[in-house]
Image (cartoon, rainbow, N blue to C red):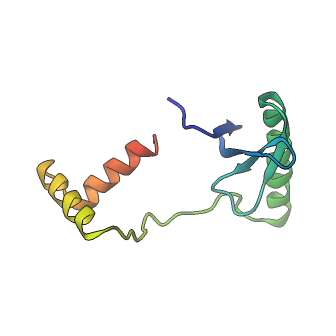
Amino acid sequence: MSMQNTMTIDGHQAVITFDPEIQMFRGEFLGLNGGADFYAKDVKGLQREGRISLNVFLEACAEDGVEPRKSFSGKFSLRVAPATHEAAAVAAAAHGKSLNQWAEDVLRKAALV
């Protein structure tokens, strides 16, 4: 199963949007320590331009001694409505899990990891 509006190029995920002003698709790589975007009119062009953009970015990181990927701590704060918090706590308990364990499972499935 694939996520909508994403493309994998050489193992890196990019989100794809359409820019109506220039009538082109725009790709932007996710999870990188800097910007690496690319434009094309079709899928084949996106793949070609994405590889070029990614290679330029990775080469610049190597030259500068910078880690190309962002690092994530595994912690983040989430604010929800009290009723949602309560419903999630009940669902977690019904599954025999802590709220944190249950939320991680739900997020993993939603993110298709």
In this view, the residue farthest toward the front is: 21
The residue that appears at 38% across and 51% down in the rendered structure is 107
Question: Nearest the camera: 21 or 25?
Answer: 21
Occupied quadrant, residue 8: top right
The residue that appears at 73% across and 50% down in the rendered structure is 28
Identify whether 60 is placed above or below 112. below
Picture coordinates of residue 57, whole percent (x, y): 81, 54
Occupied quadrant, residue 85: bottom left
How many marks can you see? 0
Question: Nearest the camera: 79 or 75?
Answer: 79
The residue that appears at 86% across and 51% down in the rendered structure is 56
Picture coordinates of residue 90, whole percent (x, y): 15, 57
Picture coordinates of residue 60, whole percent (x, y): 85, 59
The residue that appears at 68% across and 45% down in the rendered structure is 14
Locate residue 102 relative to residue 65 in the image: left or right. left
Identify whether 79 is placed above or below 14. below
